[in-house]
Image (tube, rainbow, N blue to C red):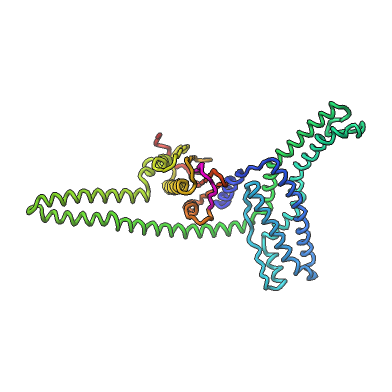
Amino acid sequence: MGSGDQTARRQRALTDHGVRTRPWTALVRCQLLSLYAFAVTAVGGLVVLALLLLPVGAGFPLLAPSARALRSLSDRARRRAADWSGIRISPPEPLAVDGAASRRARAAAVLGNEGFWRDLAWAWLEPATGGLLVAVPLALVEYGAFGALVQPLVWRRLGDGNWYAFVLVDSAPAMLAALVLGLAFIAAGAYGAPAVLRLHARWGRRLLSAPATTELRRRVSRLTETRAEALDIQSAELRRIERDLHDGAQARLVALGMALDRAARLVDTDPAAARDLLSEGRETSARALRDLRELVRGIHPPVLADRGLGDAVRSLALDAFLDVDVVDRLAGRLPAPVESAAYFAVNELLANAAKHSGAHGVSVLLEHVGGALLRITVADDGRGGADESAGGTGLRGVRRRLSTFDGILVLRSPRGGPTTVTLEIPCALSSPKTSSC
């Protein structure tokens, strides 16, 4: 399996369990989906009619509008799966139809779109599969309501052949048994509705996800953008290092050299002034050394190189303005580039939590999953509402940093909190853990 498929699978695994729905809310949504299936059937039938009329020319003016209507329904189904079940469905290529083109050209554009055929297959399979699936909890609740609400009132009038499920309702005790059984059916339908919603969304994902060729094109495009961004980041980092050296340590070392030169000229004629210059030079050299240490810490912190990611994140926790709890479950060291990317990503997330979330505490969990995946979970108790598209650059910068290693970032931040950010980077442990701190 290619790395692009693995990335998509990790993204789905992180997002598929993120939405919890109340039972009765899920039941209402199942009812809406069952009604929605009628609209899907109608539009799908219109598309098939347009296809059948193409040989005689009557389908050309009908195909493009009906295909756009079908794509609108399928896009709505994708959004609904994400909002209701937390299951992301990658969209196909847009259905680009030039309104100024001829009818035949518009029809050719529709027929050449891979996503159109997936939409059409979904339109015909959804009522027979997804529609029946969401009907199960509805049927259980309706049948349960008959047993719990209707049987106690009418069982005497229904005669000796009145069966409810496997209970022959011909006496008061049997009626009570039917009532209890009806309540059980209602509970099963209501509490099973969230699971049915998730199954329905997963079924829709099998039909509505972008074709493999589309995903491959997107993968190539992402790799091209990632490589360009990595080169830009490297170039900007080199310019920053050069500027910091020029304005900091280099300037102090030049001043130190000039002070030593003056002291050498004064050592015989004015020893006291020479000693003052040497004392000043010692202070200048200390400041230059401090500048170099800060510069090195910004490139690759010594604690990260010496002690590994867990202890480096603990050092960030000690310097943070918030109460940060770090749980390190890493059994060994990671490759140095991965440790560096993860360290600076956590640093950015802690800074974001301190500046924007209104949180009092943050928890950081470091773990290595399945022998091939670094997972970092950063959660705060703030007000939530974090939005990657709101204009800030912090989360986008973290995502770009991770994308260099084929890593992913998943943000969950509902209004009112909490905010949870999960980072995953594919990598293997490079050496056993050497620090027990």
Q: In the displayed orientation, state which residue is furthest to the top.
A: 173
> In the picture, which quadrant includes the C terminus?
top left
Q: Is residue 262 magenta?
A: no
Horizontal and vertical percent position of residue 157: 91, 34
- Residue shown at 65% from the left, 46% from the top: 85
Compare residues 117 and 3 and report the one nearer the observer: 117
Image height check: is 101 above or below 135? below
- Residue shown at 34% from the left, 49% from the top: 296
Image height check: is 194 above or below 270? above
Q: In the displayed orientation, state which residue is furthest to the left.
A: 269
Horizontal and vertical percent position of residue 380: 50, 42
Compare residues 96 and 77 and report the one nearer the observer: 77
Q: Is residue 338 visible?
A: no
Q: Is residue 379 magenta?
A: yes
Q: Is residue 75 visible?
A: yes
- Residue shown at 77% from the left, 67% from the top: 59
Q: How many marks?
A: 0
Q: Is residue 384 left or right of residue 249?
A: right
Compare residues 44 and 358 and report the one nearer the observer: 358
Question: Magenta stretch?
Answer: 374-387
Query: Toward which corner of the image does residue 147 lie, by quadrant?
Result: top right
Horizontal and vertical percent position of residue 16: 61, 45
Q: Is residue 106 left or right of residue 253?
A: right
Horizontal and vertical percent position of residue 398: 48, 51
Q: Is residue 225 left or right of residue 171?
A: left
Compare residues 398 and 157 and report the one nearer the observer: 157
